Image (cartoon, rainbow, N blue to C red):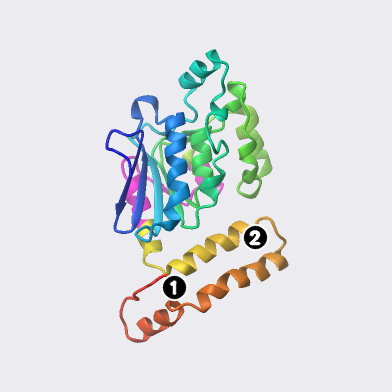
C-alpha cells in the first residue's frame, strides 16, 4: 500500500496485515502524514478479503509510538495552526470502527497518541521493557480520547495516568489487565503473530461478530447487550461457515472458511 521508505509500512503475511510505524529516528511519533496513512488503512481494510487480522507495531525496539510529533506541532503553531486541525480523524475513531480484530504489538514506549493506538486495539502484547503514559498534562494538551479507559482500568489508575502523566511499566499494566501478554524485548511481534494466527484460523464471521458484540455492548446494559449480540450472531448461524465447521470436525479436517 505504501512505499518502503514511507512513515507507515503495510504488508500482508498469510492473511495477517502488519502495520509498522516507520519513524524510529522520531520514536515513531505521529505526524500528519502518519495520521492520514493510518486513516487510509482503517477506512479500507475491511474491504480487503485477503486480510483477516491486523497487527500494529513500531519500527525498532525503543518505541512503539511516542505520540504526536511535538516538533511538527511547534512548526504548525508558528503558522497559527494546530496539529489536530490538520487531520481528518483526530481522535482515531475510524480505528475503532474496523470490523476485523486489531492486535497492538507494543515494542517500546507507548505515550500519548501511542497509548491511544494501543488502547484502540482489541488485544495487546507488550515488551517487558515497554512503558505506558498519557503525558498530555505535561505539555498543556488534552486526552478526551482516554474515556474508554473507564471500561478498561480502575478509575484511580486512569486518573493517575492522566493527572500525574508519569509512565507505568508493562508489568503493572499486565497485572491490571490492560495487556493480554508480555514478551521479551525483540519477541513482541512474533508473540503477536502467534495470537493473530490463532484468530486467523477461526471462523472470520464468528470473530468479527464477537468484536462487534462486545464493542456495542459497552454502551448497553446486560439484557439489551445480550439481545443485540443475538441479533449480530444471526448472520453467523445462517452462514455456510456454520455448516462447514461441524462438518470439518466430524470429518477430522481443518475447516475451509468462506466468510459467508
Crowd class of label 1 (few under 14; some 14 to 19; many from 20; radius 10 Å)? few
Q: Quadrant of residue 137?
A: top right
Viewer-nearest of discs 2 and 1: 1
Q: Viewer-proximal residue, 178 or 30?
A: 30
Left or right: where does residue 166 sit relative to residue 202?
right
Q: Is residue 132 visible?
A: no
Q: Residue furthest left?
A: 4
Helix, strand, or loop for circle 1?
loop
Q: CA distance from mark 2 to mark 1?
A: 24 Å
Q: Residue furthest top?
A: 78
Q: Judge whether 143 appears above or below 96 on screen.
A: above
Q: Residue at x 44, y 73 (%)?
A: 260
Q: Quadrant of residue 14?
A: bottom left
Left or right: where does residue 141 sit relative to residue 56?
right
Check the picture and name the quadrant holding the N terminus. Answer: top left
Q: Residue at x 43, y 34 (%)?
A: 34
Magenta stretch, residue numbers: 171-194
Residue ID for mark 1? 260
Magenta span contains residue 185: yes
Q: Judge whether 166 appears above or below 179 on screen.
A: above
Give the x, y percent position of residue 110. Answer: 47, 35
Q: Residue at x 72, y 68 (%)?
A: 223
Q: Residue furthest bottom?
A: 250
Residue ID for mark 2? 217
Magenta span contains residue 227: no
Helix, strand, or loop for circle 2?
helix
Amino acid at each position: 500500500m505504501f512505499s518502503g521508505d514511507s512513515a507507515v509500512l503495510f504488508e500482508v503475511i498469510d492473511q495477517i496485515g502488519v502495520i509498522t510505524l516507520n519513524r524510529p529516528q522520531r520514536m515513531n511519533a505521529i505526524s500528519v502524514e502518519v495520521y492520514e496513512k493510518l486513516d487510509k488503512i482503517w477506512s479500507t481494510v475491511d474491504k480487503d478479503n485477503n486480510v483477516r487480522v491486523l497487527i500494529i507495531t513500531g519500527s525498532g525496539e525503543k518505541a512503539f509510538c511516542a505520540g504526536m510529533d511535538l516538533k511538527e506541532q511547534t512548526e504548525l503553531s508558528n503558522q497559527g495552526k494546530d496539529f489536530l486541525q490538520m487531520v481528518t480523524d483526530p481522535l482515531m475513531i475510524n480505528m475503532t470502527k474496523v470490523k476485523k480484530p486489531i492486535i497492538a504489538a507494543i515494542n517500546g514506549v507507548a505515550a500519548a497518541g501511542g497509548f491511544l493506538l494501543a488502547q484502540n486495539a482489541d488485544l495487546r502484547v507488550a515488551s517487558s521493557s515497554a512503558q505506558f503514559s498519557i503525558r498530555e498534562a505535561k505539555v498543556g494538551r488534552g486526552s478526551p480520547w482516554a474515556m474508554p479507559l473507564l471500561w478498561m482500568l480502575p478509575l484511580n489508575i486512569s486518573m493517575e495516568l492522566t493527572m500525574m502523566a508519569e509512565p507505568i511499566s508493562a508489568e503493572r499494566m499486565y497485572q491490571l489487565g490492560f495487556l493480554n501478554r508480555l514478551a521479551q524485548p525483540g519477541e513482541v511481534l512474533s508473540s503477536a503473530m502467534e495470537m493473530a494466527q490463532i484468530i486467523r484460523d477461526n471462523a472470520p464471521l464468528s470473530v468479527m461478530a464477537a468484536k462487534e458484540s462486545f464493542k456495542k455492548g459497552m454502551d448497553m446494559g446486560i439484557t439489551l447487550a445480550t439481545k443485540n449480540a443475538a441479533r449480530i450472531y444471526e448472520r453467523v448461524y445462517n452462514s455456510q461457515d456454520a455448516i462447514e465447521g461441524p462438518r470439518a470436525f466430524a470429518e477430522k479436517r481443518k475447516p475451509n472458511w468462506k466468510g459467508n
